[in-house]
Image (cartoon, rainbow, N blue to C red):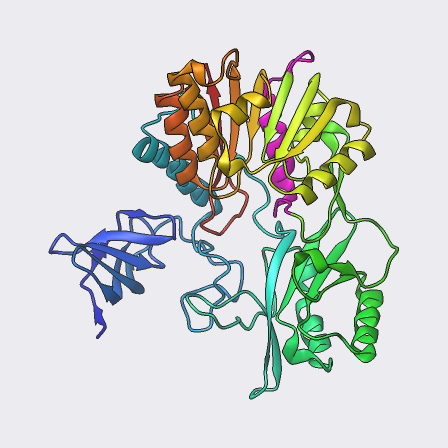
Amino acid sequence: MTQTTDWLKVESIELEAQGVAHNTEGKVVFIDGALPGEIVKAQISRRKNNWEQGQLTDIKKESPLRVTPGCPHFGLHAGACGGCKMQHLHAGAQVAVKQRVVEDNLWHLGKVKPEVMLRPIEGPTWGYRYRARFSVRYVQKKGVVLIGFHERKSRYVADMQVCKVVPKVVSDLLMPMRALIMGMAERDRLPQIELAMGDEVIALVLRHLNPLPDGDLALLREFAAKHGVQWWLQPKGPDTVRLLDEGGPQLAYRLPEFGVTMPFKPTDFTQVNPHINASLVGRALRLLAVQPGERVIDWFCGLGNFTLPLATQAREVLGIEGSETLVQRSRENAAANGLAHKTSFVARNLFDMTPGLLAADGVADRWLIDPPREGAFALAKAVADIAQDPSLAPGWTPPKRIVYVSCNPATLARDAGLLVNVAGYRCTAASAVNMFPHTAHVESIAVFDR
């Protein structure tokens, strides 16, 4: 049974963009849609012993940070798109929230306090998203095809006609793509379209559960010619992805500051936001401050997003990655950019790191770590174990500086706790990286020195 609260004073906002208040009993109330400083009422939908959760219903006093959402599909209403959580909050305030999340996680989870909090890395707040995974659903009862993100707190696909966080050229394709899928014979067996944009190419990966008949392939080719896109087909897993028709420009992005071009396949991991990625690579390398005679290790190197720029500055760079496929792609990218002589790549399970394996990769002056959401716990623990017992890796010395790029502030804080409180490093700087404006996703960068 739902119940509307009395007026509540919203004290703060948590990472999922819920306002945080306390009721007259002192119980915490999380309120969807409420902002700090506001006086609001909420309809309570969940109750636990020490907290309640509800949705904003009335505002008596509005926050000066409240703004009109830029997208018509954002909101608390039924059917609202769940792709963004913070469009009602001023973009600058969103970044401040994320900066505080990084700081709070480092302290509360890792007992680490950075000596300096750097200015957050920011960029465009609209049209920034060059990667997206759109669900596709043919709704037979309504005779309509939906393409978009899921609705808020739902498995249903939102009825999206525009999307403000992807480039306008992609947003403008949503309705034509709906018409395209509607006209295909296999329309009820096409669950997903994945977007991967490069500097010159819009790649669309169509997941299809059955082989596509010639008529459907003809419709895809006609759409590609009309709208200037590349279709890739995915009958099964990511390794089955192939171009519908060979030829045309290559899917790639550039890092102009370092004179590097990075070709990639549409299912390879690349950063969602190319503007922020370029700024992030630049800041990471400035913070790492590699000298020409130094050896660097790039852990979780992926396609070489950091490895190749590092190779323009260092004597030698070793890139280590869990996927043999990505390692091979890194080698190809290094060769294509004339950097093969300064780079080497190894495939290894980095979640199974030990002091012995760490020592086997040799001594490096500096490290760049860019792990997935799980973080780099095994790596940090191996460093900490050697610090406590040097006999585990005779003759090995730790890097004097580590730059850690994180997509999960909680695992960054956990690993930072080991590096600082056990391995003898200082956290000399940190900041948030606003890779995903209007969402609750927090990326960050931190520097460790010893």
Residue 169 visible somewhere in the drawing: no
- Up-down relation of residue 143 to residue 246 (above or below): below
Report the quarter where the N terminus lies: bottom left
Q: Nearer the viewer, residue 331 or 284?
A: 331
Give how far across and how far down residue 113 sits, in percent.
Answer: 35, 25
Q: Is residue 290 magenta?
A: yes
Q: Along the line of sight, which residue is nearer the eye, 63 or 356?
A: 356
Q: What is the quadrant of residue 29 in the picture?
A: bottom left
Q: For the magenta stretch, what is the residue range?
A: 269-294
User: Considering only vertical position in the picture, is 340 above or below 102?
Assistant: above
432 sits left or right of 202 in the view: left
State the image coordinates of residue 443 (x, y, percent, origin top left).
49, 40
428 with respect to 63 (left or right):
right
Residue 448 coordinates in the image, percent (x, y):
47, 21
**Position of 115 relative to 243 (above/below):** above
Q: How many marks?
A: 0
Residue 123 visible in rendering: yes
Q: Quadrant of the image for the C terminus?
A: top left
* Spot occupied by residue 410 in the image (x, y as percentages of width and height): 39, 40
Residue at image coords 38%, 27%? 418
Q: Residue furthest left?
A: 25
Residue closest to the eye, 335 or 346: 346
